[in-house]
Amino acid sequence: MGNLLSMPILAVGAAFDYHAGLLTDTPRLLERLGLRWLHRLVQEPRRLWRRYLVTNTQFVALFLAQWLRLWRPRLDNATDPGENLRFG
């Protein structure tokens, strides 16, 4: 998709929402336990439930299948990820 735009693409996640005070910081205990995602899910369940439940589950399943050598991605249409990068 980056090659369809004549400008760079930058993703900032929830940074603007945190700086605007729309989201609260994750409590330190949850952060230390690696549960920042759970805190965000509680704050924005309607927006994030599908990402965390469906998409992340698919990612983990495909990762494990590839790691266990049960599945290999098709590479016939693969491109170099850096070929669309433009600096300056």
Image (cartoon, rainbow, N blue to C red):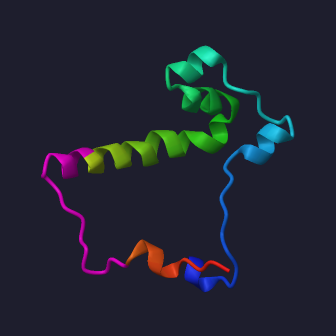
> Does 3 lie within the magenta span?
no
Q: Nearer the viewer, residue 73 or 82?
A: 82
For the point 46% across and 80% down, which residue is it? 83
The part of the image, by quadrant, that contains residue 30 is: top right
> In the image as oriented, which residue stretches furthest toward the right?
20
Q: Is residue 44 left or right of residue 72?
A: right
Residue 79 placement (x, y as % from top left): 37, 79
Locate the N terminus and report the quarter of the image it occupies: bottom right
> In the image as oriented, which residue stretches furthest toward the front?
88
Residue 80 placement (x, y as % from top left): 38, 77
Instruction: Answer above or below: position of 60 versus 76.
Output: above
The part of the image, by quadrant, that contains residue 85 is: bottom right
Q: Is residue 59 left or right of residue 82?
A: left
For the point 68% across and 85% down, which residue is it? 6
User: What residue span does the magenta drawing correspond to?
Assistant: 64-79
For the point 43% across and 44% down, which residue is it? 56
For the point 70% across and 45% down, which residue is it? 14
**Secondary structure mostly taken by the magenta-highlighted segment of the chain:** loop
Instruction: Answer above or below: position of 27 versus 56.
Output: above
Residue 3 placement (x, y as % from top left): 57, 83
Q: Is residue 61 left or right of residue 88?
A: left
> In the image as oriented, which residue stretches furthest toward the left?
69
Locate the C terminus and report the quarter of the image it occupies: bottom right
The part of the image, by quadrant, that contains residue 41 is: top right
